[in-house]
Image: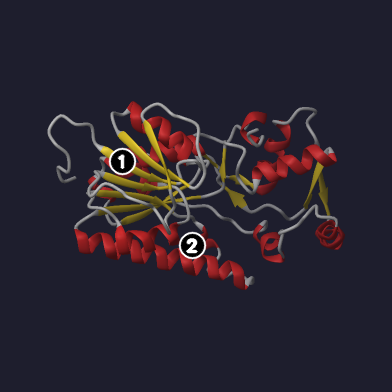
Amino acid sequence: MPPLRSSGEPPLALVFGGSGQIGRPLLARLPAAGWRVLALSREPQPELPGVEWRRGELAATGPLPAAVETILSCGPLDGFAQWFARSAPQCGRVVAFGSTSVEVKQDSTDPAERDVAGRLRAAEEQLFAAAAARGVGATVLRPTLVYGAGRDATLTRIAALARRLHGFALPGDARGLRQPVHVDDLADAAMACLDAPATHGRAYAVPGGETLPYREMVARVLAALPGTPRLWTLPPALFRALLAPARMAGLAAGFSDAALARMRQDLAFDDAPARRDFGYAPRAFRPDAAMLTPPA
């Protein structure tokens, strides 16, 4: 990392997406590791020790320092890659979060999902190209199913439905493998990458520390909730027949046929490169109710 600060001054990190589910634990770690932090947010945020909040977003950041030691992005990768390519300050390091959807959804039957995968792929390519042209070490981290802050769109949503209905239904063939990953492990991964030159110019899958069938994953979510809602396993044909009225009732809004098909698919990723290059060591999947409850 090039020396962008005067001697003895703490290094400065510019953070996008700091108010999000991965950004929050990252903002707690950076000051503890000796970083000054400048974080952008569209909305006012509560004060955090060692963090200076500024109002702004990728489309309109407002004035920024001419140089920072590192830039971290915990928000949408496509918007970040476009901003970095056109207007980023001088820096020596970039760590950005993408998604394993870049691989999972590239062959989806749903055109919208294929578009997501395509945009992620293009964003990675744009970021790496812009970073290489400037001599910046860039790393992309691709999480799997994120949980832990009560703000994810999958496991927390399952928990909410199970609380509401006192149970949750799955088709009997929902046996595809999953690797839920905790937000704290992702924040630790980003911190570890900062001082890992082997990660420059590379993208890494960052799955959770345990691989388990979809049904077992859901069973552990339900077991973590008060009252232990029941898990109903239905014949696949019956589940599909009930899905249409559930969508109409708003109970399965956004649950597409492609998402149903993925319940049968193994979505497991190799974390050996991440373990080798920056000591990645994610936890097993042991959720509790707090991890699956939206913040107030």
Where disc 2 sits, the SS reads helix
**Percent x, y of residue 34:** 28, 29
Q: Are marks 1 and 2 in contact (CB under 8 Å)?
A: no
Out of 205 and 255, give the one closest to the viewer: 255
**Percent x, y of residue 293:** 67, 34
Instruction: Mark yes or no: residue 216 visible.
Output: yes
**Mark 2: amino acid:** Val
Q: Quadrant of residue 53?
A: top left
**Percent x, y of residue 221:** 68, 37
Residue at figure coordinates x 85%, y 56% from the top left? 249
Q: Is residue 207 above or below residue 84?
A: above
Residue tagged 1 = 13
Residue at figure coordinates x 53%, y 41% from the top left? 21
Residue tagged 2 = 102
**Percent x, y of residue 95:** 34, 48
Out of 257 and 55, give the one closest to the viewer: 55
Q: Which mark is residue 245?
A: none
* In this rendering, the label closer to the viewer, 1 or 2: 1
Q: Judge the density around disc 1: few (<14), some (14-19), many (≥20) Cα neighbours within 10 Å.
A: many
